[in-house]
């Protein structure tokens, strides 16, 4: 019964947020392959990058960096910890909706040793421009 409740809750959230993102991009990355995104906003350019370093016990260890602030996440497919969120403009600089990206771990290909990760830009007021510096 609890799985059904979680499924319905996630489904309801997905429908409510279906049109929330303005832009999305899929990355298929090998171990230590860097996804680089140039974030342009309000006359400044900052670099967002992420990579994975370990896949074990169905968990993916992801390292990310944005504006020289680093983080590490352990992500699982189909789990609460499937994604991480990165705020792109500080709330002190704006009283409007704060734009952010969500990076979601979608699947791991054991044969190719690659991880698929999807990036979603949530920016209701179109203040952010993303340039993908990775060829994938």
Image (cartoon, helix red, strand yellow):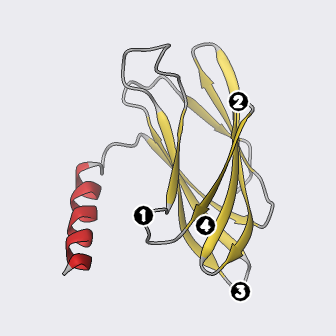
Q: Are marks 2 and 1 in contact (CB under 8 Å)?
A: no
Residue at 46%, 20% (x, y): give it. Answer: 91
* Side (left or right) of 36 relative to 118: right
Q: Secondary structure at mark 3?
A: loop
Q: Which residue is mark 3?
A: 111
Residue at 61%, 62% (x, y): give it. Answer: 74
Q: Secondary structure at mark 4?
A: strand
Percent position of residue 13, x then y: 26, 55
Label disc, if present, on residue 80 of the rendered structure? 1
Of labels 4 and 1, earlier in sequence is 1
Marks 2 and 3, how far apart at CA: 34 Å
User: Badge 3: how crowded within 10 Å, few (<14), some, or many (20+)?
Assistant: few
Q: Which of the pair 120/132 is nearer the observer?
A: 120
Q: Relative to 7, does residue 22 appear above or below in the rendering?
A: above
Marks 3 and 1, how far apart at CA: 25 Å
User: Badge 1: how crowded within 10 Å, few (<14), some, or many (20+)?
Assistant: few
* Side (left or right) of 14 relative to 110: left
Residue at 44%, 72% (x, y): give it. Answer: 78
Q: Secondary structure at mark 1?
A: loop
* Residue placed furthest toward the right: 32
Q: Which residue is mark 4?
A: 116
Q: Which residue is mark 2?
A: 67
Circle nearer the viewer, 2 or 3? 2
Percent position of residue 81, x then y: 49, 62
Of labels 3 and 4, earlier in sequence is 3
Marks 3 and 4, how far apart at CA: 13 Å
Q: Secondary structure at mark 2?
A: loop
Marks 4 and 1, how far apart at CA: 17 Å
Task: Pick the quarter of the image with the N terminus.
Answer: bottom left
Residue at 36%, 18% (x, y): give it. Answer: 96
Give the quadrant of residue 66. top right
């Amino acid at each position: 019964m609890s799985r059904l409740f979680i499924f319905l809750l996630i489904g309801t959230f997905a429908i409510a947020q279906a049109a929330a993102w303005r832009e999305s991009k899929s990355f298929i990355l090998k171990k230590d392959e860097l996804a680089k995104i140039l974030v342009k906003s309000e006359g400044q350019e900052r670099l967002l990058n992420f990579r994975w370093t370990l896949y074990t016990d169905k968990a993916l260890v992801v390292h990310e960096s944005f504006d020289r602030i680093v983080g590490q996440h352990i992500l699982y497919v189909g789990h609460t910890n499937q994604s991480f969120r990165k705020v792109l403009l500080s709330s002190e600089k704006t009283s409007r909706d704060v734009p952010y990206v969500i990076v979601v771990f979608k699947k791991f290909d054991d044969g190719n040793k690659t991880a698929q990760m999807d990036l979603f830009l949530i920016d209701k007021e179109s203040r952010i421009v993303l340039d993908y510096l990775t060829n994938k």
